[in-house]
Structure formats: structure tokens, C-alpha cells
Image (cartoon, rainbow, N blue to C red):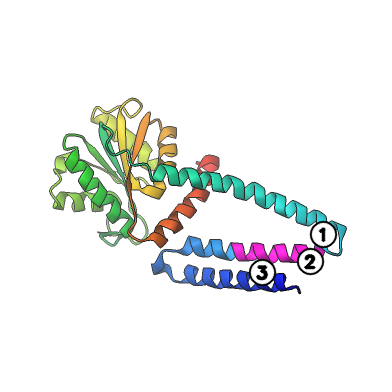
Amino acid sequence: MTKRGKIQCVIAAALALTGAVLMTVRPWGMRFSGFLLVGLGAVLVLALLLDRWAETSRAGRLCRRVFYTALTLVLVPLIIIESYVINVGRSDLSALPADAVVVLGAGVNGTQPSLSLYTRLTVALDYLEENPDIPVVLTGGRGYGEEITEAQCMYDWLAARGVDPERLILEEQAGNTAENFAFSRKLLEERGINPAEDNVAVVTNDFHIARSRLIAARQGYGYAFGVPAELPWLHLEVNYYLREAFAMVKTWIFD
């Protein structure tokens, strides 16, 4: 094996080992990055094997060409999508006027908000204090390990910090982002808000805004703009921004 090949093997092994650790230690919140690193390690090994095969076989050279072409066709669109997700997530439009607010739910640990949900709630609290006269839909059902619905958790947290409970509309059935918007739309219409024409501020994490806007448009929201909440640690931001590029592809194709 050439020196380059040995270096490639060492890098692949390091990536796979790091990825396995990230996948195993769940509290770090880096499982997706772990899967990604293991995948990158596998790609490096496969590239090395194809390079060695191509040295002695015409079929190997053909397979190597197909492999690198396919890899380019996957990576280039993902890089473009990732750039779009980052750009939208970093665009804070919270200064725009809104007719209503939708706060998207996230995980609840028993009865307490998860880190992701906590960051959304802190941003929502600031936004509601700056916009005191508009209705708010808190949307999210009850998932695994949650003793109460995400909507109820958000209601309790905001009400305890002085938000008028009369403003808070609970939507407790949604199990995903598409349902968040679909079910919230009906509740907004009952309050005289027309999501197809009125401005709706959507509070969610910054990495989630691009996909949320796409899903909102598909659910008939004419103009839903994001109010971004950042996670407190850079490694989590990187992990979830990377994941969102793949989630955007899933949403375009299946949702």
C-alpha cells in the first residue's frame, strides 16, 4: 500500500472511531454527526479500494469514474442546500410586523422543556413582550418520554413568566412540523387570522427555519417568517445544521 493509501486508512479509521463515540454518547446530542463521520470513513475506504482496483482493471477504472461522478452529484446539491439553510437560519426577521405567532414544539423531558424547546421559549417570551397584542399558538403533541404535551409545557413556562394565558392557544395533537402548521391554521382561523394573507411569525430554532418556511407554504401560509432561536453550544449548532440539509431533501421529496 502506498503512503497516501496508509494515510487514507488512518483518517478513515479516525473518522469511524470518532463517529462511533458520538453515536454512542447520546447526551452530547451529536448522533447525526456520528453517522456522518462513519459514512465519510466508509467513503474513504471505498475510494481507496476503487483506486487500487482501477490500477489493474478497466472495469475498476469505469467503476471508479461512476463512483466519483455519483459522489459529486450528491455533494454539490447538498452543499447548495446547506448554504441556503444557513443563510435563512441566520436571517432574523423578527422586526417585521406579525398578525399572529406560532411557536413550534420540541422535546419535553418529563414536564420540563428540553434544551431546544427552552431556547425557543426564551426567544418567544421576548418576542411576545415586544408584540403584546397578537395571538399565539403553541403547537406540539405528546411524544415518547413526555409526561405532558409540548404545547402544555410551553403554556406552563410562558404563563409562569407573565404572559397572559388568554393569548395562548394550545394545539396538542401535532406530531410533526407539517401537522404543527396544519392544525395551527385551523385555530388561527377561529381567531380571525387568515394565514394565507396575514403575516405569521414562526418561533423555532435557527437551523429549522428554512424547512419550516417550506412546510408552512405547503400548508397554505402566505407569509410565514422565522424568529430564530440559537442553541447555546457551537457543536450542537453544527450538528443540527448538517442534519437539516438532509431533512430538507426528505421534505422536498416525501412531505
Q: Badge 2 local density, few (<14 within 10 Å), some, or many (20+)? A: some
Tell me which label, 1 or 2, sits earlier in the chain. 2
Whether the magenta-drawn stretch holds residue 41 is answered as: yes
Q: Quadrant of the N terminus?
A: bottom right
What's drawn in magenta, residue-wise? 40-53
Q: Look at 52% across and 50% down and name the residue there.
A: 246
Position of residue 95 measured from the top left corner of the image (x, y, whole percent): 27, 36
The residue closer to the viewer here, 238 or 177, is: 238
CA gap, disc 3 to disc 2? 13 Å
The residue indicated by pointer 3 is: 8
Give the answer, above or below, for where 147 lies relative to 138.
Answer: below
Marks 1/2 in contact by CB < 8 Å: the verdict is yes
Please identify the quarter of the rendering in which residue 253 is found: top right
Tell me which label, 3 or 1, sits earlier in the chain. 3
Residue 165 appears in the picture as rendered:
yes
Whether the magenta-drawn stretch holds residue 135 is answered as: no
* Majority secondary structure of magenta residues: helix
Q: Look at 28% across and 29% down and name the residue there.
A: 189
Instruction: Determine which of the numbered discs, if any, sits on residue 60 in the image.
Output: 1
Say which amino acid is labelled 2: Arg
Q: Badge 3 local density, few (<14 within 10 Å), some, or many (20+)? A: some
The residue closer to the viewer here, 214 or 192, is: 214
The residue indicated by pointer 2 is: 52
**Mark 3 element type:** helix
CA gap, disc 1 to disc 2? 8 Å
